[in-house]
Image (cartoon, rainbow, N blue to C red):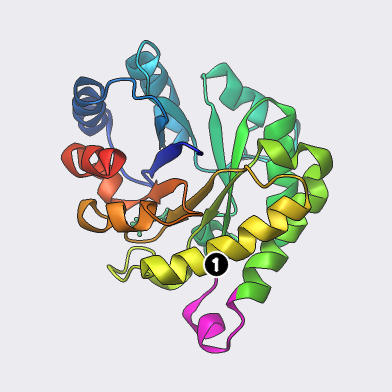
Amino acid sequence: MRGKLIVGNWKMNGSLAANAALLGELTAGWTATPGRELAVCVPYPYLMQAQAELSSTPIAWGAQDVSEHAAGAYTGEVAAAMLVEFGCRYAIVGHSERRQFYGDTDAVVAAKAKAALAAGLTPIACVGETLAERDDGATEAVVLRQLEAVLVALADKATQLVVAYEPVWAIGTGRTATPAQAQAVHATLRARLAKAGAGAVPLLYGGSVKADNAASLFAQTDIDGGLIGGASLKAGEFLAIARA
Ligand code: PGA
């Protein structure tokens, strides 16, 4: 059986003081658990703090994005090799907020995943449909198109990927996909990944995961954990999700 991976996505939240409190509570509350991995993806300026606080703990950390370029004249961007210097294990790519507000296309997301992997990071590639796309019956087509770009870019390295299904209509809205709705999409993604020889890739669900709905989501055959936004900012809630 595949283990569970629970990743916090802090988004653009935090401060040195608030992070110290949150990371302190997480490290105090989490012990190494076979088959369970906990990670937090923090804003870039706090990577050094995450590294200092988490290095000697079983909690991993990562970034919320990464440049598709290795180095050079790309003002404002952060290279994968820089993230590695700060001990990152993960880089989220293709979060719907990046796609929506910063114009990250399928091609850019795929290039970011490739750059992350080349530097030794594990990309967490996000896919997900909008409410309009779901209402149009286009959910499968959308997530498969988004996944396809990444699979083509990674080729035989796709086995090293993590994929997160995050229906856009469920992010930060309090509206969660039902376990059955999520499982249906995960099964579709799993089948495509298996065809690429990457059927064992962890498939996370994200979108208003809370302590009280995590267990039923994680009980689904093809849900291998969660990508947690709002609830990852509260230590008690995040730990309860991690244990669900
Ligand atoms: P949410 O966000 O848990 O606050 O809905 C999830 C995400 O965007 O990764």
Q: Which residue type does callout 1 highlight? A: Val
Give the residue at the far top of this rendering: 56
Q: Is residue 173 above or below residue 216?
A: below
Ligand 1's quadrant is: bottom left
Residue shown at 41%/48% (left/top)? 226
Front position in the image: 237 or 172: 237
Give the residue at the far front of this rendering: 1
Residue 170, picture quadrant:
bottom left
Q: Magenta span has 134?
A: yes
Q: Is residue 111 above or below residue 23?
A: below
Residue shown at 16%/39% (left/top)? 236
**Residue ID for mark 1:** 185
**Residue 133 visible within the image:** yes
122 vs 2, left or right, is right
Q: Quadrant of the C terminus?
A: top left
Residue 198: percent from the left, percent from the top? Answer: 71, 44
- The magenta segment is 128-139
Residue 115: percent from the left, percent from the top? Answer: 73, 36
Q: Magenta span has 223?
A: no
11 vs 214, left or right, is right
**Residue 108 visible within the image:** no
CB of mark 1 near ligand 1 (< 8 Å): no
Front position in the image: 56 or 18: 56
Residue shown at 70%/39% (left/top)? 159
Residue 184: percent from the left, percent from the top? Answer: 52, 69
Front position in the image: 110 or 181: 181
Q: Secondary structure at mark 1?
A: helix
